[in-house]
Amino acid sequence: MQCSVCGAEALDLTSGDFDGLVVRCKRCGEYEVADDALNGFLRLDYDARVAALNKARGEAGRGVRPSITTDTL
Ligand SMILES: [Zn+2]
């Protein structure tokens, strides 16, 4: 798959446990995008997607995978 943030080749770690995408990208690390946030997230430009990921990262605790939700956008 392609990373939803930067478009680089990325691993799709999506499982049934989470309602959305789980991505591992060499550049962006691991993150989740909730299903209901995905369309809005993909409509953002690159800088805004990076900013959203950084915000989610700041909100996640240490060792916790950042999760991009409608609240993040
Ligand atoms: Zn990426």
Image (cartoon, helix red, strand yellow):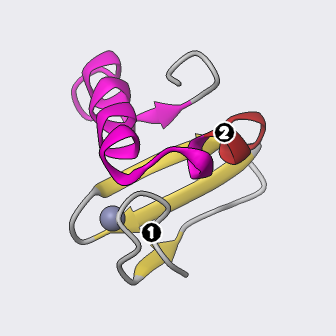
Mark 2 sits on what residue? 40
Q: Amino acid at mark 2?
A: Gly
Magenta-highlighted stretch: main secondary structure?
helix
Q: Position of residue 22 (x, y in %)?
A: 56, 56
- Badge 1 crowding class, 10 Å Cα cut-off, few under 14, some 14 to 19, many 20 or more, is many
Q: Which residues are magenta?
A: 41-68
Q: Position of residue 16 (x, y in %)?
A: 78, 55
Magenta stretch contains residue 5: no
Q: Looking at mark 1, is its residue's CB closer than 8 Å to ligand 1?
A: yes
Mark 1 sits on what residue? 3
Number of numbered discs = 2
Which residue does the image show at 34% across and 23% down from the upper left? 60
SS assignment at label 2:
helix
Magenta stretch contains residue 43: yes
Which residue does the image show at 75% across and 43% down from the upper left? 35
Q: Position of residue 1 (x, y in %)?
A: 55, 81
